[in-house]
Amino acid sequence: MTQSERNLLIKLRVGQSKEYLADASSMLKTGSLKSANNRSYYAMEKAINALLLLSNTAPKTHKGIIQQFNKCFIFEGDGYFTIHDYRKLIKAEQIRNASDYDDFFQPSEQDSLQIYKDAEALIEKICRYIEEITQ
């Protein structure tokens, strides 16, 4: 993949991330908490996938994305991303899994709103980082 192609893919993934975040916001307003949890998590995941392109990493699974984020940007990173960012992602994934697969799971409005806020903050942080690195 050329640098130009990589930059285009980063831009597309960030755009999709922001679209998913907007979807989550709308779903929160209508009380569709399980769907909002799904979109908030996938917004984070798309942004992280964009970020991972900077390290020439392209995992194919949720677990792989999380592991590579931890390895490349938390454990071996430059300190910009922290263990708190990683923990927010893990919590969002756990609640997304319960929302998607546990028929009896009832997310709280507070938890769903927190995941949305965490996604919003992480995506902003990722966008700033990508902008700094790619300029």
Image (spheres, rainbow, N blue to C red):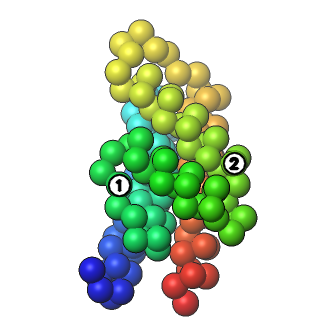
Front residue (pair 95, 106):
95
The residue pinned by badge 1 equals 59
Q: Secondary structure at mark 1?
A: loop
Label drawn at residue 123: none
Residue at image position (38%, 43%) is: 62
Residue 15 horizontal/vertical position (percent): 39, 67
Q: Secondary structure at mark 2?
A: helix
Q: Is residue 19 left or right of residue 132?
A: left
Residue at image position (64%, 41%) is: 87
Q: Is residue 1 left or right of residue 29?
A: left
Examine the rendered structure and indicate whether residue 44 appears above or below residue 113: below
Q: Quadrant of the C terminus?
A: bottom right
Residue 9 horizontal/vertical position (percent): 33, 73
Q: Is residue 4 left or right of residue 112?
A: left
Give the distance between the C-alpha atoms of the residues marked 2 and 1, in whole angstroms: 20 Å
Residue at image position (38%, 16%) is: 102
Q: Residues within 10 Å of mark 1 (few under 14, many from 20)?
A: some
Q: Residues within 10 Å of mark 2 (few under 14, many from 20)?
A: few
Closer to the N terminus: mark 2 or mark 1? 1
The residue pinned by badge 2 equals 83
The residue under label 1 is which amino acid type? Pro
Residue 16 horizontal/vertical position (percent): 36, 61
Residue at image position (62%, 62%) is: 76
- Image quarter for residue 111? top right
- Image quarter for residue 61? top left
The residue under label 2 is which amino acid type? Ile
Residue 114 horizontal/vertical position (percent): 64, 38
- Image quarter for residue 4? bottom left
